[in-house]
Amino acid sequence: MNRFDVYLKDDQETQKVVILQSDLHLRQLDTIIVAPLVPDKVVKKPYLRRLLVPVTFESETYFIIIPQAGPILKTKVTVYRGSLSAYHHDIIEALDFLFQGF
């Protein structure tokens, strides 16, 4: 498991999550901080645009829903699907906006 990896939650194809937490702490804790990765067509956009990170994953448009980030048990994420590390800057920018206000 690495930061910005995409996993299935509870092995369900419709529940993808992105790991947001630093790699340094992943092995030492039983929980990880993730955010949902949701297809564009099902996202209701009441959020500030800067809190939704648009990404292309598996040839489709998704959004990382930063305001819904939270902890889950590592045992809930077992099926690796890919990495969004190419979007590192955009994800960090959205996290900063959520937590720092800028």
Image (spheres, rainbow, N blue to C red):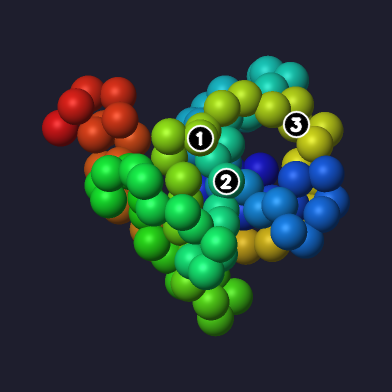
Crowd around label 2: few <14 · some 14–19 · many ≥20 (10 Å):
many
Q: Amino acid at mark 1?
A: Gln
Of mark 2 and mark 1, the one earlier in the sequence is: 2
Can you give x and y, in whole percent of width and height, for residue 75 in the image?
82, 33
Assign the C terminus to one quadrant of the image: top left
Q: Residue at x 56, y 53 (%)?
A: 37
Q: Is residue 94 above or below residue 59?
A: above
Q: Is residue 81 above or below residue 25?
A: below
Can you give x and y, in whole percent of width and height, for residue 41 in the image?
52, 69
Residue receiving disc 1: 68
Q: Does residue 88 appear anywhere in the picture?
A: no
Crowd around label 3: few <14 · some 14–19 · many ≥20 (10 Å):
some
Q: Does residue 49 appear anywhere in the picture?
A: yes
Circles 2 and 1: CB distance less than 8 Å?
yes
Q: CA distance from mark 3 to mark 1?
A: 17 Å
- Relative to 22, 86 lies left or right: left
Q: Residue at x 56, y 57 (%)?
A: 38
Residue receiving disc 3: 74
Q: Secondary structure at mark 3?
A: helix
Q: Amino acid at mark 2?
A: Pro
